[in-house]
Each structure stands twice: as C-alpha cells, then as structure tokens.
Image (cartoon, helix red, strand yellow):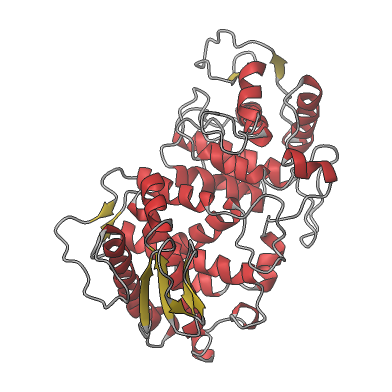
Amino acid sequence: MTDGPSGPKRGAADSTLPVDNADGGEMDKIAVNAVNDVQEYWKERFRTDFKTEFKPVSRLLSYDSNGRGVQICRSSTEGQVNAFYCPLDDAIAWDRGELLPMLNKRFGPMAVVTVLAHEMGHAVQHRLATAGTSAGIPDDAKITSSTPSIVAEQQADCYAGAFFRHVAEGRSKHFEISTGKGLNQVLASLFFIRDQVGTSFAKQGAHGTAFDRITGFQYGFAEGPSRCARIGVKEVENRITELPFIKKDDQKTGGNIEINAANLEAIKKSLGEAFRDTGAAAPSFRDSVGSCSDAKPTKPTAYCPSSNTVSLDMADLTRIGTPPKKGDRQSTGIGDFAAYGEVASRYVMSVQKAVGAELKGDVAGLRTACMVGSWAGQLLEHPVNKRNPLPGAKISPGDLDEAVAELLSEHSLIAADVDGRSVPSGFARVEALRVGFMDGVSPCTEKFN
C-alpha cells in the first residue's frame, strides 16, 4: 500500500486522438487521455496475452446529455447520462455534461478513468470475439449476442482492473494512482454505480452488486487480462452474489433487520456454529465497553483477550446498522450487516487467540476480515452454487455491499486488529473478506499469518 498523488500526471501532453463533438473542456481532456492510455495498454497486452493485434476503436464521441442530441448507435444521446461502447459503430461515447462531472466531483478524476476503462473493456470483448482460437478463450466466456449481460460486465470490470494495475505500476502516460487512498476512491466509484439491491444477476442489463463488481476488478488487478477472458457463464453463475429478495417484506426493508438483543443472540449462535470446528471457547458478551489489560477499547464493539470478552455499545451499533434513507447524506448508518459484521470481527478475535495467532498489526486485521468473510459465506443460500448454509441466520441481498461500505470507510473495524487499527488499504480489506467468503476459513490462516 502506497500513498501519493492520484489523477492526471503533471506535464503530460494531452492526447491528440480525434473526438467528435468535443468542447475541449476538462472532462473531455480526462476522457480522451484515458482512452489513449487504455488503448496503448491493450496494444501491448493483446500481443502478449492473446497473440493477436489490437485495433483502436473507430470513433470517439463526446456529448452533453442536457444539450442537443448526437446520433450514435442508431439513437440520440439526448438525455443519456451515460458512457458506453457501441459495437455497431465501434465507438466509445461519454456524457461530459452530467455523468463525468458528477463522478469527478464525488470520487475524483480516476473515477472517470475507471468508467472509460470499463467501456474500453467492452471494445476488447468485441475484438476478442473475432480473434479465433489463438486467444485461448473458453467457449462460455466468448461474448456473443446471447451472452448474459452479467458475464460481459464482469469481464469489463476485470479488464478495467487489469489496466489500473498498469497505472499503479507507473506505466500510464497520463495518469498515476496510489494503492492507498487512490484505489479506495476507485472502489468507491464502483460501489456507487452498482445495481439496485434485490436485482437478479439473470436480468438483462445486470452489472452486479458492489461486491461482484469489485471482485471482477480485483481479479484483473491481481491476475491480468488472461484471467478476465476466462470469466464465463459457469463461473459467474456459481459465484455471483446479485440475487433477488426472497421475502416480500425485504423489498421494503432492503433486507435489513433490527439491531436488538434477540437478533444479536441469533448472530452469536451462528458465529458459534461457524467456528465450532476450531475448538475455541466462545467469548462472553457484556453491554458496555470496559477496561482491558491487554488491548485498547474500540467502538462500537471491543474484544479483551485476557477475559475473552466482547463488549458492545448497542446504541452505536444501532446507528451503524440503520441504513440511511434515500437522499439523506447526513446519516452515518450503513446497514445491519455492517453492524453485525463488526460484532463478528471481535468474535473471531477470540478464535484467533485460541489458536495462538497474533492479534495486533495489519496481518491480524486482514485475517480478521477474511474470517468475517468466511462466516458470511456460510450464511448464503445460493441458487446455483449449492453450499450448505448454517441453520438460523442468513445474509440477504445487499449485505455484502454493506460489508464493502464498512470496509471502505475511514475506520473499518471489520478489518482492524484487536486495538482497532484498520488496515490502511481499503483494496486489501475487501480482498481479504472476499477470500474468506469464497474459499472458507482455511486460506485466512494460510494467507495471513
């Protein structure tokens, strides 16, 4: 994890790629420089990864969604607050009037680069579809007119992640990014443009939850374009978490339950079942955060190793566990899983203590996030991947996104050590939770020790 500048590089000459309908403003400069650098990246990687040549897109189009429409893809851009790739015209288009300024204001210029790198990912798919068998792409990962949209979107997120690894290594002409705050903002932008909670991954046009989108991005960042090209129908159907609500009431509540004593008991029982095989003695719980001889107090929940006790501040947990109402930017709440996930993070400290693991430092924080993820993975009832979920508590659609929101917050307790010191990299926090969620508890001790 490195800190430093993130955004356009100072002194880099702007790209001279031709852009239709451009106004020469800041958004157009960022967008065309992004397309320039992404295409340069793909020129290199098509040769090394796919043994073929990359052809630049045929047209770039800038437009203002609030202004006069421009024709592309047999339709008008008027009112289209969007950025997209059009296979029909082999074109990349972006809304400089509303979409890009909003992303830039909320998340910074690298959010704009993220969106353009994603759309260029669709151009990559279009080219690989005609590349032949030399590209080594599995049949169910080749993008055709009948491919489920979630597969195409997962691949595009992955290709964007692969490009950002290139940027993080300092090899982009126009942009730079820190792997600390810079990547955190990129992941936050993916969270912002996730699908609505309760959407089914089988729905045409589905892009995925924040957890799903970040998973795709991290695959590309860690493993490169060849991994992205292998994301096919079978893989996506087995691991995707974008599921519809099962209960009717969940649509109203967003799948959230109250933070109260009865539900807390169900969570404690679930955690006991999840880690029963470790042989660790379950910690005792108390309602107030007291003093501890061998750990600093943390809020809203704390773990004391010497007494094997988890302390709770129910009022603060309720605040975190109450999701904000639409349009409410003052609320600091996230949702029920953020609150119960923080409780789980202190519970798994007792498991780590029992097996003799170190409870302080970044490695302990990552191991903790991983173990919380492994617990969450045992609470999922997946329609395709027939896991054997624990009895009792279950996670609902949106819970993993609440975990992501907590992990990307300034002071994440889910990915913190016993003293409450959060792992500095939000990217690493989410990755650790994902490892546990997908692969179980064993990799938590193997990877983070």
Q: Nearer the viewer, residue 1 or 151?
A: 151
The single residue placed furthest to the top in the displayed view is 291
**Residue 309 rendering spot, x and y as whole percentages:** 66, 16
- Residue 94: % across, % down: 41, 67
Q: Position of residue 38 (x, y in %)?
A: 35, 70
Spot occupied by residue 61 in the image (x, y as percentages of width and height) = 37, 74
Residue at the image position 37 percent from the left and 61 percent from the top: 96
From the viewer's perspective, is 29 left or right of 340?
left
Question: Which residue is depicted at the point 71% across and 63% down?
Answer: 238
Determine if residue 312 is in view: no
Residue in view at x 35 percent, y 82 percent: 56
Point out the image quarter for the N terminus: top left
Q: Residue furthest front?
A: 68
Q: Quadrant of residue 390?
A: top right
Is 248 placed above or below 218 here?
Answer: above
The image quadrant that residue 114 belongs to is bottom left
Q: Relative to 368, is 121 above or below?
A: below
Question: Viewed as shown, does residue 249 lie left or right of 89?
Answer: right
Q: Quadrant of residue 138?
A: bottom right
Question: How many circles with numbers are drawn on the protein?
Answer: 0
Which residue appears at 37% of the width and 53% of the height?
A: 101
- Asked if residue 50 can be seen in this view, the reply is yes
